[in-house]
C-alpha cells in the first residue's frame, strides 16, 4: 500500500522558498555586506546602488525574518554600548530663549534616548544654515540618522531641507510642512478634560482664554473642544465667546475687565498670567472666579490648579517613535505621517476649589 503524501511542506522545501540576502547580492553583482547596508539605508551606500538592491529584493520576493532581525538588533545594540550614536534636536530658538515647556520636552527625550543608547545633540536652524541648505550635509557628515523637532515660534515650515536620509519626529503640532511624524498634547481631549473637571465641580458659566496664535498652532483643537463642550451642556443662549480669539494683538487688563464685566464667568480655563491679572483688577481667585491653567512645568507647587500637559512623556514618546523608525530603517518623509496624542493630567491647586458656586455670575462688578 502506498503511503499517503503529507500536506506539510518539507524543511528543504521551506528553505528553498526563502530568498536570502546572499541570493540578492549575487543577482545584483555586489557583496553581501553591500546588500545588508543598502537594506538598512546606510549613508555610505550610493543612492543608485541602494535603489537597485531594493528593486531586486522586491522582485525576488525577499522578506526579512523577524526573528533574525531581532537577533541582529541585539547584536548591534551590544556593540553600540561602546559608543553612543547621536540624534539631532533641530531648534529654531536658541536654548537660552526656549520656554520651560520646550526645555522639559527636550530633557524628556534626552533621558529616554539615553535608555535606548543614543545621545541627543542640538542644532540651531539659523537663517544662514537654512538659506544654504547646509543642515542635511552636516548631519550626514556626522552620521546622524534621526532628528527631533521641538515647538517652533509659529505654525511653521522648515524649508530647503533634505529629509530623505533621516527619521524625523516633531514634538509639536506647530510644524505642518514638511509632513513628518508628530507627538503632541491632545489639544482637543485635554481642553475638554479641563472644562469637564470645572463643570463637575459646579461651574456653569465656564469661559476660556485663547489667543489667535495658539489657536493656529493647535490647528483649532482648543476652540473646537470649547464649542463642542458648550453645545453638549448649554443652550446656545448661554454660550460664552472665547476671550482673546478675536484679537490680533496680546490681551491686556482692559480686555480682561471688559470680558469679565460683560460675561461674568464663574470659572475660566486660561494661561497662568490671567490669575494675577484678575487679582489686580479686584476679582478674588477662586472665591469670585475659579481659574484652571495650562500649567508651566517649572510650577512645582500647588498654587495653580489645572492641566499638566506632560512634556516629559511627550518627549519620551517622541524618542521611542524615532528610535522605532531607525530600527526599521524607515527614513525620509512618510507617506502616511503618524500623529501621537498624549493626554494631560489634572493637578489640584489653590485657584480652583473642590466646589464652584457661581461666584463670578453673582459678584458685583469689580473696580
Image (tube, helix red, strand yellow):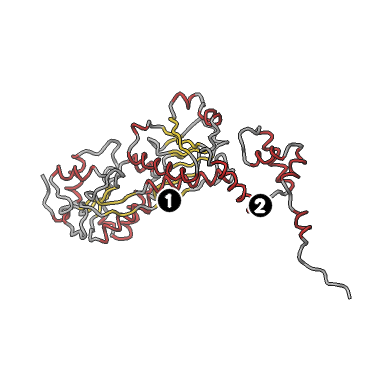
Percent position of residue 78, x then y: 56, 45
The structure residue drawn at horizontal position 35% and vertical position 52%, both measured from the top left corner, is 344
What distance separates the C-alpha of mark 2 from that of mark 1? 32 Å
Which residue is depicted at the point 46% across and 43% down?
114
Residue 235, compared with residue 136, is above or below; it is below
Q: Is residue 259 left or right of residue 210?
A: left
Q: Which mark is residue 216?
A: none
Query: Who's the residue at 74% across and 43% down the image?
Result: 24
The location of residue 184, given as percent across then percent down, is 41, 46
Query: Above or below — where is 362 with respect to 215?
Result: below
> 10 Å neighbourhood of mark 1: few (<14), some, or many (≥20)?
some
- Look at the numbered disc 1 and give the secondary structure of its residue: strand
Instruction: Say whether residue 108 is left or right of residue 298.
Output: right
User: Which residue is the site of mark 2?
Assistant: 65
Quadrant housing the N terminus? bottom right
Q: Is residue 215 left or right of residue 356?
A: right
Which residue occupies 74% across, 49% down? 19
In the picture provided, is 224 more to the left or to the right than 177? Answer: left
Q: Quadrant of the C terminus?
A: top left
Question: On screen, 131 above or below 196?
Answer: above
Tags 2 and 1 in contact by the CB under 8 Å rule?
no
The quadrant holding residue 282 is top left
SS at circle 2? loop
Front-most of residues 271 and 248: 271
View extreme (right): residue: 1
- Judge whether 141 appears above or below 11 on screen: above
The residue singled out by tag 1 in the image is 341
Residue 140 position within the rendered picture, expressed as x and y whole percent measured from the top left: 55, 31
Amino acid at each position: 500500500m502506498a503511503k499517503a503524501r503529507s500536506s506539510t511542506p518539507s524543511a528543504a522545501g521551506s528553505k528553498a522558498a526563502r530568498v536570502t540576502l546572499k541570493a540578492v547580492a549575487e543577482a545584483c553583482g555586489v557583496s553581501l555586506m553591500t546588500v545588508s547596508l543598502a537594506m538598512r539605508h546606510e549613508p555610505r551606500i550610493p543612492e543608485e546602488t541602494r535603489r537597485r538592491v531594493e528593486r531586486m529584493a522586491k522582485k525576488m520576493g525577499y522578506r526579512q525574518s523577524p526573528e533574525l532581525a531581532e537577533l541582529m538588533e541585539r547584536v548591534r545594540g551590544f556593540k553600540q554600548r561602546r559608543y553612543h550614536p547621536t540624534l539631532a534636536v533641530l531648534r529654531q530658538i536658541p536654548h537660552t530663549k526656549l520656554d520651560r515647556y520646550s526645555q522639559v520636552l527636550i530633557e524628556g527625550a534626552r533621558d529616554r534616548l539615553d535608555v535606548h543608547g543614543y545621545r541627543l545633540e542640538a542644532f540651531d536652524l539659523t537663517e544662514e544654515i537654512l538659506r544654504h541648505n547646509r543642515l542635511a550635509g552636516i548631519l550626514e557628515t556626522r552620521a546622524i540618522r534621526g532628528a527631533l523637532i521641538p515647538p517652533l515660534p509659529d505654525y511653521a515650515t522648515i524649508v530647503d531641507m533634505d529629509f530623505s536620509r533621516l527619521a524625523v519626529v516633531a514634538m509639536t503640532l506647530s510644524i505642518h510642512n514638511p509632513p513628518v511624524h508628530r507627538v503632541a498634547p491632545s489639544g482637543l481631549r485635554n481642553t475638554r478634560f479641563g472644562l469637564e473637571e470645572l463643570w463637575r465641580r459646579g461651574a456653569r458659566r465656564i469661559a476660556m482664554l485663547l489667543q489667535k496664535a495658539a489657536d493656529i498652532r493647535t490647528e483649532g483643537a482648543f476652540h473646537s473642544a470649547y464649542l463642542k463642550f458648550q453645545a453638549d451642556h448649554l443652550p446656545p443662549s448661554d454660550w460664552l465667546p472665547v476671550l482673546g480669539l478675536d484679537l490680533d494683538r496680546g490681551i491686556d487688563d482692559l480686555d480682561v475687565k471688559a470680558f469679565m464685566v460683560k460675561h461674568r464667568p464663574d470659572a475660566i480655563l486660561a494661561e497662568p498670567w490671567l490669575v494675577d491679572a484678575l487679582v489686580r483688577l479686584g476679582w478674588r481667585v477662586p472665591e469670585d472666579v475659579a481659574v484652571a491653567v495650562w500649567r508651566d512645568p517649572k510650577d512645582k507647587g500647588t498654587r495653580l490648579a489645572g492641566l499638566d500637559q506632560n512634556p516629559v512623556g511627550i518627549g519620551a514618546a517622541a524618542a521611542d517613535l524615532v528610535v522605532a523608525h531607525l530600527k526599521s530603517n524607515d527614513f525620509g518623509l512618510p507617506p502616511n505621517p503618524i500623529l501621537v496624542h498624549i493626554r494631560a493630567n489634572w493637578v489640584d491647586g489653590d485657584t480652583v476649589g473642590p466646589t464652584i458656586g457661581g461666584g463670578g455670575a453673582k459678584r458685583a462688578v469689580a473696580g
